[in-house]
Amino acid sequence: MSSVKAWITAFRLRTLPLAFSSILAGSFVAEFYNCFQWPVLLLALFTTLFLQILSNLANDYGDTVNGADHEGRLGPQRMVQSGMITLSQMRIAIVIFSVLSFLSGIGLIYISFGGFIQLRFLLFLLLGMAAIAAALKYTMGSNPYGYKGLGDFYVLVFFGLTGVGGTYFLHSNNWDWTLLLPAFSIGFLSTGVLNVNNMRDIKSDQVAGKRTLVVKIGLNSAKVYHYSLIILSVVLLVVFSIINKFSLLSYLYLAGVPLLFLHMKAIKNAKVADDFDPQLKKLALSTLVLVLLFGLGIMIG
């Protein structure tokens, strides 16, 4: 494998549709409330791109160092564990993408708020730094939170509440509590993707001592938890639509729901890692389709 291909593999670009979904959802809601700004959307997408790649690189590094990526692990090949990328090379890349995430985030906040010396700028700066720390600490360091079963909570916070709600605030400089509905909706779907990943890796995580939520509650309970996440995500979007008195055309996103039910059926029948792995991509893309239909419905409704 060439060095370029190794780095592209390490970036795990298939995770990007899910990461972008929360930014797009927050932006579509901003469009509905007539406060959408193109510069905010573009910079938010760049910042999310850098943060997601940073998280993937840190995960590759941390799981190798902590033993979760070992020869018996199933799923996609990891670049550090396989020797395609050295630990020192990965550390340099992690620093580079940390800096890129920080600089892009600073630009995003400045464009949104029009200045540095104000409380909301400082609050979002701290939030951005927390996002960088969360990307690093999932599997890196002496006490990674991903090894304690806390990954689901952090995904919900940063892909849902921060991704959707924070993006809307950056567009509007305003807050509406009903935004929690789509924020939790996309957050639940994003948490579902992590849950599929952890169901796939349950055996290798048990061997490595990685106590994900799936390891703690077992595979059968993890499946029930998974169904709950997906069903609640759809219910919350419908409630948001009802509260905002959407037109019938604005319910276009319901056309994407069958994809989620097909995914749940596949998860129900899944037994081994190879059954779960394709569902990662399918749920991530289904989430993006749902968000795009949600946005299209808003614009034509």
Image (cartoon, rainbow, N blue to C red):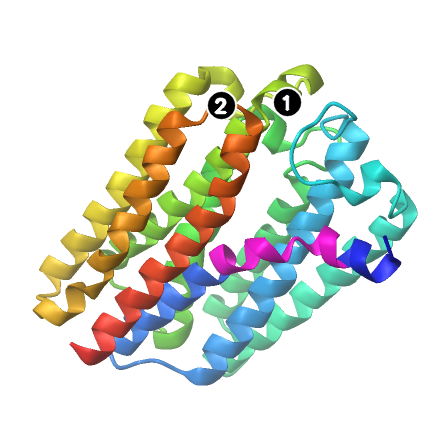
Residue 176 position by quadrant = bottom left
Image coordinates of residue 13 in percent, x first then y, are: 62, 58
Residue drawn at 80 percent across, 44 percent down? 79
Image coordinates of residue 261 in percent, x first then y, are: 28, 42
- Amino acid at circle 2: Val
Which span of residues is magenta-colored?
Answer: 8-19
Mark 2: give few (<14), some (14-19) or many (20+) Cα within 10 Å. many
- Residue tagged 2: 214
Residue drawn at 35 percent across, 80 percent down? 36
Asked if residue 6 is among those painted magenta in the image, a careful observer would answer no
Residue drawn at 79 percent across, 26 percent down? 71
Q: What distance separates the C-alpha of mark 2 from that of mark 1? A: 9 Å
Asked if residue 9 is among those painted magenta in the image, a careful observer would answer yes
| Left or right, 118 with reference to 6 | left
- Amino acid at circle 1: Asp
Mark 1: give few (<14), some (14-19) or many (20+) Cα within 10 Å. many
Which element type, helix, strand or loop, lies under badge 2?
helix
Q: Compare residues 124 and 204 and report the one nearer the observer.
A: 204
- The answer to whether residue 36 is above or below residue 124 is below
Residue 174 in sight from this viewpoint: no
| Left or right, 90 with reference to 42 | right
Which element type, helix, strand or loop, lies under badge 1?
helix
- Residue tagged 1: 205
Residue 296 position by quadrant = bottom left
* Earlier residue among tags 2 and 1: 1
Residue 269 in sight from this viewpoint: yes
